[in-house]
Image (spheres, grey):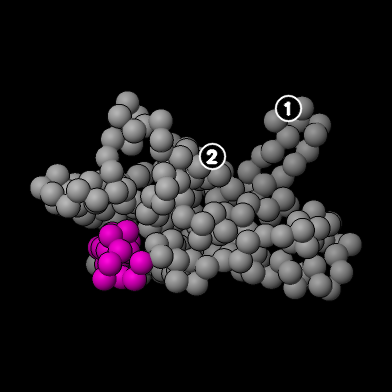
Amino acid sequence: MTSILRIDASAQLEERSLTRRLTSLFETTLRKANPSARFTHRDVGADPIPPIDHRWIHAAFTPPANREPWMSERLALSDALIDEVIAADIIVMGVPMYNYSVPAALKGWIDQVARIGRTFSFDLSRGDAPIEPILSGKHLVVLSSRGEFGFEPGGMRAHMNALDPAIAACAHCFGVDRDMIETVAIEYQEFKDARHEASFAAAEAATIAIAERLARRPAIAA
């Protein structure tokens, strides 16, 4: 059975969020093509993940056998979020561009999921590349919206795009190789003109095509 983890990071409600419309379209399309698919929904926009702090770091970097009870309690949410990632074959994220980067709500999720001993290992015997991912084989679909345009490689605002590189840099902690990331973006949102309408229509078509293709993807998660 194919398992999908859907993450919505928009601070907007469904009727005002373009990325939520895309993630809903993705889910509806994939369910229709693969009725047995299992979805888990984590709405970090509506229910933000608390940021990590010094107690979280202390707990995370303490070997499990040496943890005090409060440490396990402090990491309980992180464990639940990581378990959702482990169980997923496909991760679909609704990620609006806020101030040219990822929403704080998504960054909070990433910081809880990127954890030593659970999603990556650290060993100085590897020299200058001590970090290795623990998870693998997953597919990531990023459904985004941007108020302006030209954030693609070579575009007039490519140098301002801190969203796509941030997600790609952390994707190994989700078990995703860089070549397994697909991004669909609605642009021109602030212009509200024909270009925006065309970009929205193209994004919807691309979202449907990706969902239909991934509906046939073999399950890999444990």
Determine if the magenta segment contains residue 65. no
Residue annotated with mark 2: 169
- Crowd around label 2: few <14 · some 14–19 · many ≥20 (10 Å): few
**What residue is at 32 percent from the left and 26 percent from the top?**
154
Q: Where is residue 134 in the image (x, y as percent from the top left)?
A: 64, 47
- Left or right: where does residue 85 sit relative to residue 2? right
Q: Position of residue 184 (x, y in %)?
A: 30, 47
Q: Look at the image and tell me whether residue 116 can be seen.
A: yes
Q: Over which residues does the magenta segment extend?
A: 12-31
- The three-letter amino acid code for the residue at tag 1 is Asp
- Left or right: where does residue 16 sit relative to residue 91? left
Give the mark nearer the N terminus: 1 vs 2: 1
Q: Distance between the residues labelled 1 and 2?
A: 17 Å
Q: Is residue 163 above or below residue 118?
A: above
Q: Is mark 1 on a helix, strand or loop?
A: loop
Tell which of 86 and 51 is nearer to you.
Answer: 51
- Left or right: where does residue 107 sit relative to residue 59? left
Q: Where is residue 25 in the image (x, y as percent from the top left)?
A: 26, 63
Q: Position of residue 221 (x, y in %)?
A: 52, 57
